[in-house]
Image (tube, rainbow, N blue to C red):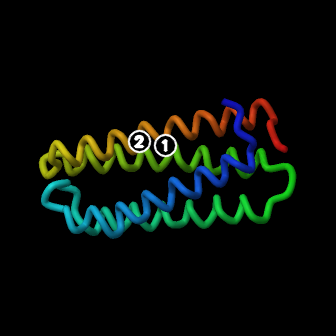
Amino acid sequence: MNYTQKHLFLLDAIGALVTTVLLGAVLPILQPCVGMPIVILYLLSAIAAAFFLYSGACYLLIKSSRGTYLRMIALANIVYCFLTFSLVIYYWELMTAFGLVYFSMEALIILYLARIELGAVNRKVEF
């Protein structure tokens, strides 16, 4: 699929908003089923909220030359996945099967999106 850089910011913002709500409101309620400490869920939610604001602002405000901004959020998404992976390892003994599945699926989706974003930057698809 060929997504425009502008639409990738929208997609990223929507995904970050979903992650923010899940990590900040839903998973803390289900914390015993997840295993990750609530404070870490809130930390990851705050990072996702910052990504939502960044991607949303880029979608609404950047009119041209979006490549640098898109590369930044793609790389930030990759770093977020490594951070999450590190936290899962650190809290391994607390993690549940549900928590491992959740964080694994989240990382796969985010890394796939980052791959698409970097591909769009390299193709210079801007419309």
Pick the front one: 71 or 63? 63
- In this rendering, would 36 be left or right of 115? left
How far apart marks 1 and 2 lie (CA) works out to 5 Å
Looking at the image, which residue is at 58% across and 57% down?
13
Q: Residues within 10 Å of mark 2 (few under 14, many from 20)?
A: some
- In this rendering, would 11 be left or right of 102? right
Residue behind mark 1: 110
Considering the image in quadrants, where does the N terminus appear? top right
Quadrant assignment, res 27: bottom left
Examine the rendered structure and indicate whether residue 21 appears above or below residue 65: below
**Coordinates of residue 88 in the picture (x, y in percent):** 27, 47
Looking at the image, which residue is at 77% across and 45% down?
67
Residue behind mark 2: 107
Which amino acid type is marked by label 1?
Ile
Which amino acid type is marked by label 2?
Ala
**Coordinates of residue 118 in the picture (x, y in percent):** 66, 36
* Residue 72 tag number: none
Considering the image in quadrants, where does the C terminus appear? top right
- In this rendering, would 17 be left or right of 24? right
Pick the front one: 67 or 1? 1
Answer yes or no: do the residues labelled 1 and 2 have beta carbons within 8 Å? yes
**Coordinates of residue 82 in the picture (x, y in percent):** 42, 43
Provide the secondary structure element on which disc 2 rests. Answer: helix
- In this rendering, would 64 be left or right of 116? right
Provide the secondary structure element on which disc 1 rests. Answer: helix
Looking at the image, which residue is at 59% across and 44% down?
75
**Coordinates of residue 126 in the picture (x, y in percent):** 82, 42
